[in-house]
Image (cartoon, rainbow, N blue to C red):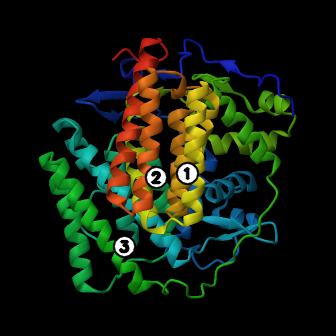
Amino acid sequence: MKEASIESTRVPNSDTVEIVKDDDDPSIRTDGGVTSVTALDTRPPLLADLAYERLRDGLLVGGDLAVLDQLVEEDLAERLQMSRTPIREALHRLSLVGMIIDNSAGGYEPRRFTTKEVLDHYQVRRELEPLAVSWACELDPDQRALALADPRLTPTHSSPAGDRTFHKAVAAASGSRPLARMISQFVDRLSREGVHAYGAPDDEHELARGHELVIAAMREGDPRGGERAMREHMTLLFNLISRSRPPLGAAVPARIPLPVRPSLAHHAYETLKQAILDGGLVAGTSLIESSTAESLEVSRTTARQALRRLEVEEYLDRDSRGRLVVHRTSRAEFIQECEIRKALDGAAARLAATRISDEELDRLDALLVEDRTALRDGDHERRAVTNTAIHRAIAVASRNKVLLEASDDLSERTFGFGRVAFAIGSRRERSDFVDEHAAMVACLRAGDGDHAAELVRIHIDRSSQLLLKHMEDDNGGPDD
């Protein structure tokens, strides 16, 4: 691959900064610190999008494709009366969000989760979805009324599909693009698992009651009440898993995929994503399939798959003409991503306090020595690497792979884009960050999960505020 330049075109009159003022983006409003997103794109959906929605819904419990053990491109094209190209792209996207997996025959099959994997997803959702309700409740009355008009926000709990759409509607009502993306992905992943105890009247009543309490809190604009109602609702769902799933450790008829060499499409994706994170591809840059393929020295099919993945992960957007452009991160969105990271990294620390091994604690102690040495030497690059290693080690110790995946993603998004916090702030502030790392590890060693979680949240909040102020002062971000 060429490492020089990735060919691109500029969108006329587009901003070139990576983080922009909310006022400069017509699709984003901020009311009282809470963002609401207005849909401006009225283009008809792409065939690949239609195929994705059709396949996704067909694979759900009760769907017409749910009985299939193998997903064959040619057969699906015939069933859906579409050409094979949009079906191929839809299958690729379904694999990216985790609903299907590659099989040994070169095709796909529905993904089946172990009980531990389902529980891991619900632990993460139990952190994210109360936050979504809280943000929805903080919208102004007009925005809340608009959100409550969504027919998917129904207090009933009559079917798995109805529950799925309810949770995705609440996520959308939060006004947070990153939060809605994460919740929707996890909801879709678990949509085939049948974790709800349908048919048990008492459970059905409690689940429907949870929906009612969430909606009532949104009507009243009660963030605390809404957060509490959703957390209780998610806890009930979490507890119901044991009634409808094999016990932990039981055999599950699911194929464990063997490790495979990264594909050319994966390499192309990583190259493009790193260019976005490093600022080489600035916000508003339009990526054209043919020129991207030429610059990366790959086929157009490979480039298309890489670009599609970046679009699914919202590093790229489609403009009004259907062109893929690098996503512009607003100030509000950056703050939201930091808030989400606080919730997830705090949860990881709480879990890690009771699950971390002595060997992992020793490794963290060694990282703390490296952290302090890098501070003394003024080596900001080494401090950045060490900081990432410390936070990731805590996430790994949580023994929740879904939490680790989400934490890795948010870490890249909040401290990527060339925004390195380790060369800014006073000497005292930099030293404080090192001390905070040491305090977190001390709490983990003492088994104090609650205190560790609180320290992690404070640590991320302080570093993100310092970084945001630096970007504003440096004219690399919004003024307000």
Which badge, 1 or 3, is on the more N-terminal residue? Answer: 3
Q: In terms of depth relative to the viewer, which is nearer, 331 or 425?
A: 425
Query: Residue 449, how many percent across, how many down?
Result: 37, 60
Q: In terms of depth relative to the viewer, which is nearer, 477 or 47?
A: 477
User: What's the CA distance linking mark 2 and mark 3?
Assistant: 29 Å
User: What's the CA distance linking mark 1 and mark 3?
Assistant: 34 Å
Residue designated by label 3: 238
Residue 303 appears left or right of 133: right
Mark 2 vs 1: CB contact within 8 A? yes
Can the viewer see residue 314 in this picture?
Answer: no
Residue 99 appears left or right of 262: left
Mark 2 vs 3: CB contact within 8 A? no
Pointer 1 local density, CA inside 10 Å: few below 14, some 14–19, many at least 20:
some
Residue designated by label 1: 365
Q: Which kind of residue does numbered mark 3 sit on?
A: Phe
- Mark 3 lies on a secondary structure that is helix
Residue designated by label 2: 441
User: What's the CA distance linking mark 2 and mark 1?
Assistant: 8 Å
Q: Which kind of residue does numbered mark 2 sit on?
A: Val
As drawn, 421 above or below 346: above
Residue 305 appears left or right of 384: right
Identified at 34% across, 77% down, the residue is 239
- Mark 2 lies on a secondary structure that is helix
Query: Residue 369, how many percent across, how many down?
Result: 58, 43
- Mark 1 lies on a secondary structure that is helix
Q: Which kind of residue does numbered mark 1 sit on?
A: Asp
Can the viewer see residue 201 in this picture?
Answer: yes
Mark 1 vs 3: CB contact within 8 A? no
Identified at 75% across, 70% down, the residue is 103
